[in-house]
Amino acid sequence: MEKKQYNRKIAGVVIFLALVLAFLGLLAWKLSGDWRNRGRVEDAVIELTPTATHSQTDLDAAAEAVLEHFTCYRQCKLERLWYDPAQAGPLERKVCENTDRQPEQVVVLFADFQSGDQGCLVRENYEQYIKQDTHYRDYRFLLLWHPDLGWQVQNSLIEQNLPESTPAVVTPAPTPTP
């Protein structure tokens, strides 16, 4: 009987210490200031139109991948994320033509976002500078399906595989807002 009470006390102490360590870790992260610089997605309007190629479930998962990826866009605020089959279709077909991907393994999502007052350098498989205080419209995210990983943002691949006559996908022309 005494041993059970002793084990319960030890378990309680271990759980309490784990909670204290988790709290201290969260507090240290918040105090570091990094959380304030992350790309903000919480107020974004998301509009996804399913097609015969991309189901609502696929598009939701692709959008979730973009939302997670967008946190790398320091001090930027995502306003809108959408899938437009008419806009995305030609880009997706070109990627399929230049790779071994099937149409259901490629999706292009579009976004509007505002950059912060310091601009930022997005690092992924490439480096891309986001200009300060700029409103980006029709920014394009290329996603590829990986069986083990799900949807992955692959912006750099679209630059390498689309013909030069195709408008740039990764480097959008910023549309300043007065």
Image (cartoon, rainbow, N blue to C red):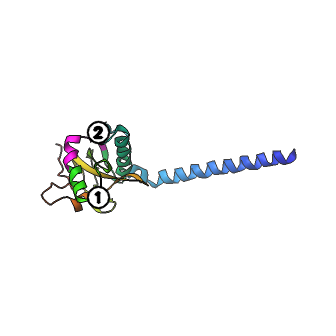
Write down the residue under mark 2.
52
Secondary structure under tag 1 reads loop
Give whichever of 132, 55 is nearer the camera. 55
Q: Which residues are magenta?
A: 78-90
- Label 1, label 2: how many angstroms apart (C-alpha)? 20 Å
Tally of numbered tags:
2
- Residue 100 shows which numbered tag? 1
Q: Position of residue 121 (x, y in %)?
A: 30, 59
Give whichever of 170, 85 is nearer the camera. 85
Q: Confirm whether residue 170 shows in the render.
A: no
| Left or right of 114 on screen, residue 27 | right
Q: Confirm whether residue 72 shows in the render.
A: yes
Is residue 45 inside the magenta stretch? no
Crowding near the residue tagged with mark 2, few <14, some 14–19, many ≥20 C-alpha atoms within 10 Å? few
- The numbered mark, 1 or 2, whose residue comes first in the sequence reads 2
Does residue 154 lie above or below 59 as drawn? below
Crowding near the residue tagged with mark 1, few <14, some 14–19, many ≥20 C-alpha atoms within 10 Å? few
Residue at 34% x, 48% y is 66
